[in-house]
Image (cartoon, helix red, strand yellow):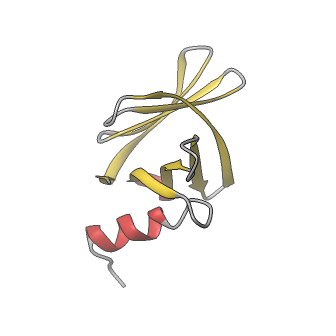
Amino acid sequence: HVRSRRQRQMCIRDSCDSGDRAFAVVAAEQGIKAAACETRSGEKYYRSDTPQGSGSMDIIVDEGDRVVAQNGSYKYQMSPSGVLVTKDNEVVKKYAAEAWGTA
């Protein structure tokens, strides 16, 4: 069935670890979902869920409507326009946003 934009955002917010809050979420084309999460102690991390699997990594930039996480030479940027994946600062993949939300 078709979910409303709000329902998709709530589903993505569930991507954070239990007790943590999502302060930004994006749903992008090809089933990509990502959340910028914050622990109760203030630590921030990025959580992604893709058809290929899921993962978490540290956030290195938080500008509200642009969040960047890094895993080795890969960077993952989420914003209202979608998710951008780079390796050594070269674009690897770009996924257009279907829904974006902040809290």
Tell me the quarter of the picture where residue 10 sits: bottom left
| Whether residue 46 is situated above or below residue 4 in the rendered picture | above
- Camera sees residue 11: yes
At horizontal 58% and vertical 47% (from top left) the residue drawn is 41
At horizontal 31% and vertical 36% (from top left) the residue drawn is 65
- Camera sees residue 28: no
**Left or right: 74 in relation to 85:** right
For the image, the number of numbered tags is 0
| Whether residue 45 is situated above or below residue 60 in the rendered picture | below
Q: From this viewpoint, which residue is outermost toward the right? A: 72
Where does residue 12 sit, x and y in percent of width and height? Answer: 46, 63
In terms of depth relative to the viewer, which is nearer, 25 or 44? Answer: 44
**Left or right: 21 in relation to 7:** right
For the N terminus, the quadrant is bottom left
Where does residue 29 sit, x and y in percent of width and height? Answer: 41, 53
In terms of depth relative to the viewer, which is nearer, 39 or 93? Answer: 39
At horizontal 56% and vertical 59% (from top left) the residue drawn is 16
Q: From this viewpoint, which residue is outermost toward the bottom? A: 1
Tell me the quarter of the picture where residue 18 sits: bottom right
At horizontal 52% and vertical 48% (from top left) the residue drawn is 38
Where does residue 20 sit, x and y in percent of width and height? Answer: 55, 59
| Whether residue 42 is situated above or below residue 88 in the rendered picture | below
For the C terminus, the quadrant is bottom left
